[in-house]
Image (spheres, rainbow, N blue to C red):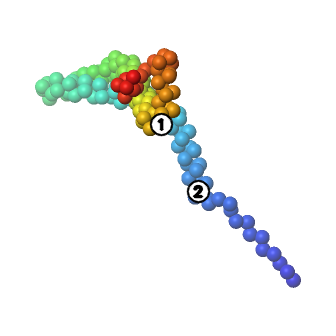
Amino acid sequence: MTSFAHVDYPTEHPGVARAQRTAQTLSRAARGFDGTRASASFLLAAIVAALVVVANQMVETWTEGHLLAAWTVMWAVAFAAMALFATPAKHAAIAIKAGWKRWAAARKQAAEDDQLWQLALKDARVMADLSRAMNAGVLSDVHAYGARYF
């Protein structure tokens, strides 16, 4: 009597599949993350903490009998600071994020320009193309290295 053993081996490792699902979940969570809100919250927390420290320094001089009043004043300062500085902190965080993106884009463009210029220094055809483009006014921004040679 003949019997066959049909063993189905998995085509992928369960640990690898689990790691891929974890990576997908983390990337979806990262896409939904808004750095502006987090940085605004941290900025607001820093401002409120500074104001609470100032209020604590002022309240420390009071006598022991006014401890409840001191805590009430400190919490009033904290909540008033959160109410007053929430919008400016959010605007500041948005401005910082936009500035960071502009700076990163400018750095990337400068690196690409430098790479093209280094290639042009080695290849006469690319240099001729750049020279024609600069003379025709197609390139409005002459690279720093190129400004010395043209």
Task: Name the amino acid type tagged 1.
Answer: Asp
Residue on which the image places disc 2: 16
Label 1: element kind = loop
Expressed as whole percent of the image width and height from the top left, the position of residue 45 reads 33, 28
Q: Who is closer to the viewer here, 19 or 139?
A: 139
Q: Is residue 70 left or right of residue 26?
A: left
Q: Is residue 53 left or right of residue 102?
A: left
Snapshot quadrant of residue 77: top left
Label 2: element kind = helix
Task: Name the amino acid type tagged 2.
Answer: Val
Residue on which the image places disc 1: 123
Q: In the image as oriented, which residue stretches furthest toward the bottom?
A: 1
Q: Residue at x 30, y 25 (%)?
A: 48
Mark 1 or 2: in front is 1
Q: In the image as oriented, which residue stretches furthest toward the right?
A: 1
- Vertically, is 135 above or below 117? above
Q: Residue at x 55, y 47 (%)?
A: 23
User: Nearer the N terminus, badge 1 or badge 2?
Assistant: 2
Q: Residues within 10 Å of mark 2 (few under 14, many from 20)?
A: few
Q: Who is closer to the viewer here, 142 or 148?
A: 148
Q: Who is closer to the viewer here, 145 or 74?
A: 145
Expressed as whole percent of the image width and height from the top left, the position of residue 74 reads 25, 24
Snapshot quadrant of residue 85: top left
Q: Residue at x 51, y 32 (%)?
A: 125
Look at the image and tell me whether residue 130 can be seen: yes
The quadrant of the picture occupied by the N terminus is: bottom right
Expressed as whole percent of the image width and height from the top left, the position of residue 91 reads 39, 19
Identify the disc placed on residue 54. Answer: none
Snapshot quadrant of residue 94: top left
